Amino acid sequence: MAKKTKSESEQVSAPKTSKIFSRQNIVIAGFVLTLVSVAMLLAFISFFISGSQDQSALDAFADRSEPVSNWLGKTGAFIAEFFLHQGFGVASFLLVRLLFLTGLYMILDIPVVKLRGTWFWDLFAILIVSVSLGFFANFLPELGGMVGYELNDLLQDFAGKAGTALILVLGLIVYLIFKVKISPDFVKTFFEKPEKAAPSEDDLKAAAAAQSAATAYNLEEFAVEDTAATTVAPAAAIDFSIEEEDIPEPVLISKPSAFEIDKEALKPTIGSASEIQLKTEPQRQEISLDVTNDEDIEIEGHHVDPEEAFVIEKVEEEIVVSENLADRLVADFGLFDPTLDLSNYKFPSIDLLKDYASGGITINQEELEENKNRIVETLRNYKIEIAQIKATVGPSVTLYEIVPEAGIRISKIKSLEDDIALSLSALGIRIIAPIPGKGTIGIEVPNKNPTTVSMKSVIASTKFQEAEMELPIALGKTISNETFVVDLARMPHLLMAGATGQGKSVGLNAVLTSLLYKKHPAEVKFVLVDPKKVELTLFNKIERHYLAKLPDTEDAIITDNNKVINTLNSLCVEMDNRYSLLKDAMVRNIKEYNEKFKQRKLNPELGHRFLPYIILVVDEFADLIMTAGKEVETPIARLAQLARAIGIHLIIATQRPSVNVITGIIKANFPARIAFRVTSKIDSRTILDTQGADQLIGRGDLLYSNGNDVIRVQCAFVDTPEVERITEYIGSQKAYPNAYLLPEYVGDEESGIKLDIDVSERDSMFREAAEIIVTAQQGSASLLQRKLKLGYNRAGRLIDQLEAAGIVGPFEGSKARNVNFTDLASLHQFLNNEENNK
């Protein structure tokens, strides 16, 4: 039987391999049709530009001395004359489209049979368009062509002008209904757009019963083959990134056909996110089993004990419907792409960065040997013998790892820090006793000729390019000369501190540059606070790409400390709004939310949107505390405690994070610390909770701590011209219309009674808000939010102003305010009188 099948398949496929219809011939024919269509297009366009000049040349086609203006010469003029003037007119351009598509299908090995409908409806459209232009534009024969003109005369002779018009309208309607798929119901729905009422429970049950009766599925198709009840586990449950709410609870069906539900088998499958609820009312129940592939099964007339009666709620039906719709949308349009608005955006080239250390690290063997001997000699002077010593050379520091002899106390070696520094004539050494994870003691000695770590070498490293992180940051290189890459999303906030001129601003530039090289403008936004007004101004050029700001604000980079308060409070409002979205989406963090949004499981009409990461960068936090104090501390503390899950991260730089600058609440939520060189051990303990930062050598030498481990890193150097070239490259590309707008926030000093007393200080939307309130006869801030698309603070201020003007009544708890005007005429008269009395 198998041989017969094989021979039949060979016979079927034989015509495809014949010489006449070989693949090469089909491809050549496809290219010929494509080039012919392009030639016809050029000839047609040239005809409308200079067609009248070539009429005489067509009569002398064989005369080579006769000039023509058509782009394809006399052949092009003949083709254009034949199709446009003697043929179908402008409608002949559809023939160009048909030939091009046919040739393209042949080249790409797509069955040309799929074009049958296109050929039929395009030829139908050619006739309709040609006759219509001959009917309405008979004064210009090139539009409808000779065919359209003659057919129009023929129809008018037998049906008259009115009949011809009706025939053309009929042809247009047929084309729209069968080709464009525009039905009368669609037109009615487009104009009416009624608000769909939520279906009642009876309607849902009736629809489910009709679906079940129509499909008439056999229950045994879904039964498990084993005699015992078995859990049907979906394959997607293996992927732990999928939300538990996204996977419907597996249905258990036992083998016997008596439709008995095994309670013991059902118990383990009920999770906390399950939509199955226990009914306590003793009555006959309908058990509906939802299947994930749009198949509904109902078992009616079966009496189940009240304790074992499980009913799938209407909420689960809606979830299943929405998930099936999301699957269809993904199948039709693919996953949502947040970068689609700037699909042509190109990341900065690595050539924009300068390579400061092209030769790499140079190892001075004499220096290593000399330092080793001095360390051993110094320790021997204090009767400390060394069993083993080895060196690891870094960009600016060399790590000497020593293994002391048995019986040597570590604290004794640690106390000799200053003596070893004296013997080595070093700027400052740092002893790590012991090195975490190793049975050695580390002595870090600065190199006499430190090597500059360029940002180019860090960005080009494989570790950064292949980093599977949400917000990768390349800080620099460690002592072992490895690129140090961390994830800001896991920190989740970063505290940078160090004395003046030790590299804090360069470190901030390195952080921002890393994100610019890795993240698309749709994925991350920056809120930059620069009290010094000169450090971050270069990033103004990428305002409409990467920066976020308040509405009605000119500069995206905040240099005025008074505006920082509104920005921080606006970020708190954004944080609350994002948490509401996460709650509605039933997810726990921004990564799961965006993944669900990309899978089209969240409806944008309900307020859902793709959420970019927001990174707040403050260059001099101590200056803000000195000028604003508690007004800055409160929103910073809220963001530090709560903003991690919704993608808002903080990077705060200060010279000394003392208790009066960084409070205990803020500091507890900044586990990631970067300490550049400081002047005292007290400052080092304040930053890192341990000493060591006072022994750094400066010029970008830093200690990074994210918990207990402290890692020494040489920060990558990125100069101002490099940052300028990067921002110019990004700023020269297509951008969004505006910068990313944060929610509006109005401080308490700008709202309330003060605005209501002075009529001239009313909100610009006061009159429009009053008309909406009177029209709806409902005085509430939420109504103004929906109608005018305002934030809650501005809507509340408008309500207070309307109350002061006497348009709405006072606050009455949960009730809506009374409206004192019954119609718009009386309202307009009141407002006009008020303006005249100013």
Image: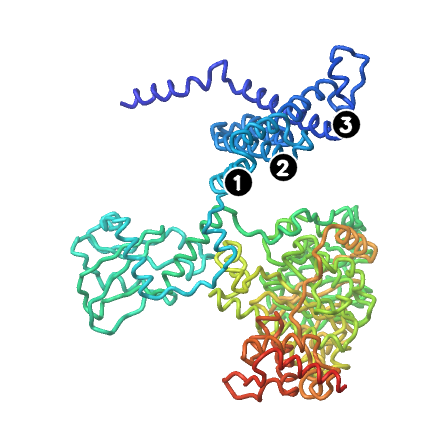
Q: Disc 3 marks which residue?
A: 50
Q: Are marks 2 and 1 in contact (CB under 8 Å)?
A: no
First along the sequence among labels 3 and 2 = 3
Q: Which mark is residue 102?
A: none
Q: Residue at x 31, y 68 (%)?
A: 277
Q: Please, what secondary structure does the residue beneath circle 3 have? A: helix
The x, y position of residue 66, in whole percent, is 80, 15
Of residues 575 and 742, the one nearer the viewer is 742
What amino acid is labelled 1 in the image? Val
Number of the front mark, 1 or 3: 1
Dot label at residue 136: 2
Give coordinates of residue 665: x percent, y percent: 62, 79
User: How far is mark 3 from mark 2, CA to CA?
Assistant: 24 Å
Where 707 falls versus 402 (above or below)? below
Sequence-wise, which precedes: disc 2 or disc 1?
2
Q: Amino acid at mark 3?
A: Ser
Q: Secondary structure at mark 2?
A: helix
Q: How is the image coloured?
A: rainbow
Gap between marks 2 and 1, in whole Å? 13 Å
**Quarter location, residue 303:** bottom left
Q: Is residue 419 visible?
A: no
- Numbered circle sitting on residue 169: 1
The answer to whether residue 800 is seen in the rendering is: yes
Secondary structure, mark 1, is helix
Specify whether 27 is left or right of 222: right
Estimate how packed mark 2 is, as few (under 14), some (14 to 19) or many (20 or more) residues with alpha carbons within 10 Å: few
Amino acid type shown at disc 2 = Phe
* Nearer the observer, 776 or 233: 776
Instruction: Determine whether 562 is above or below 248 in the image.
Output: below
From the top left corner, tell me how far across and down residue 528 is, in percent.
73, 67
Graded by Cα atoms within 10 Å as few (under 14), some (14 to 19) or many (20 or more), the crowding at tag 3 reads some
